[in-house]
Image: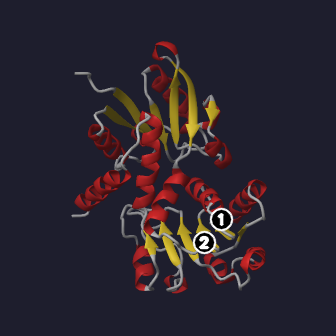
Amino acid sequence: MTAPAKLLVGLIGAGIQRSLTPAMHETEARAQGLALHYQLIDLDATGQGVEALPTLISAARTMGFAGLNVTYPCKQAVIPLLDGLSDEAEAMGAVNTIVFERGAAGRAVRAVGHNTDGSGWRWGFERTLPGADLSRVVLLGAGGAGSAIAHALLRMDTRALVLVDADPARAAAAAERLNAIYPGRRASHAADAAAALAAHSAQAAQAAQAAQGGTGRATGLVHATPTGMDKLPGLPLPAALLRPDLWVSEIVYFPLQTELLKAAGAAGCAVCDGGTMAVGQAVGAFRLFTGCEPDPARMDAHFRSMVARRTH
């Protein structure tokens, strides 16, 4: 009997001790006959920051890691340390998965960065809200996760996308980068969620009208900031702005039912919780790490069972 392949992977980030990603990968690997160990590499545990990345990437390469996930605050800082980027990671300017491509005798010859955040969000969103109206979408948060989702939305033919961020300059810059890649100048920015949800910005409203007419009234809301996490409770926008004809997608999954989702449900909105993106990005990373096709439904069921245990 042939022994199962042994794989070593990990996650580099700050404050990641509660991550469910290791268990998702290890359990799916066992189901496929693979021996996989997933190691947390928490910068907070040693008081280090992104300055530790060169040493950590070099050590992982030397120790025979198959790959690494990277999260806050490393998604942009790791890029100069890599030998190449996938088209997805290059377009987004952020990496959440590194694969150590091996040559002769199993030697790691190239560290290649990928990004499964956008595809992971899309997998969960389309599974949960199939047929959702994407004509005019408001995206709260223009950071790493928000940027990945913005790319996904524009690839899904969103007609008008407006970005809102605590740093208006970051939202404006992100919109310009998107418009340089995707045709039709469909991305814009607004100062706050109220203006964005009512009619977007003037530019977004014009884009929506050009695409299919109408007033530019938003059809969907994606929340991609940390607000609502256990350690940062609250709502990212006034609950009064939510309305029944608006769908709401959340990326926070600790807790799974955030204050935003509770308010959206009470307002009659169709909702998509943050767990779907957590599973979706892990599905993509598992495929890259192992070369095997994961079972997304099985990974999702396992993820939700873990969340349920943590909340009881």
Q: Which mark is residue 70?
A: none
Taking the image as shown, residue 312 lies to the left or right of residue 15, namely: left
Q: In percent of the image, x 44 and y 34: which residue is there?
A: 291
Taking the image as shown, residue 92 lies to the left or right of residue 287, namely: right
Q: Which mark is residue 157?
A: 1
Location of residue 95 by image quarter:
top right
Q: In percent of the image, x 30 and y 59: which residue is there?
A: 304
Q: Nearer the viewer, residue 128 or 77?
A: 128
The answer to whether residue 43 of the structure is visible from this angle is: no
Q: In percent of the image, x 41 and y 80: which residue is there?
A: 265
Point out the residue furthest to the front here.
Answer: 1
Indicate the position of residue 62 as horizontal and vertical percent values. Answer: 47, 19
**How dense is the environment of label 2, judged by Cα within 10 Å: few (below 14), some, or many (20 and up)?**
many
Separation of marks 2 and 1 at Cα, in angstroms: 7 Å
Seen in the picture, residue 175 relative to 217 is either above or below; the reply is above
**By what rule are the colours in the image chosen?**
secondary structure
The answer to whether residue 38 of the structure is visible from this angle is: yes
Q: Which mark is residue 134?
A: 2
Location of residue 75 by image quarter:
top right
Q: Which image quarter holds the C terminus?
A: bottom left
Seen in the picture, residue 45 relative to 125 is either above or below; the reply is above
Q: Amino acid at mark 2?
A: Leu
Q: Amino acid at mark 1?
A: Asp
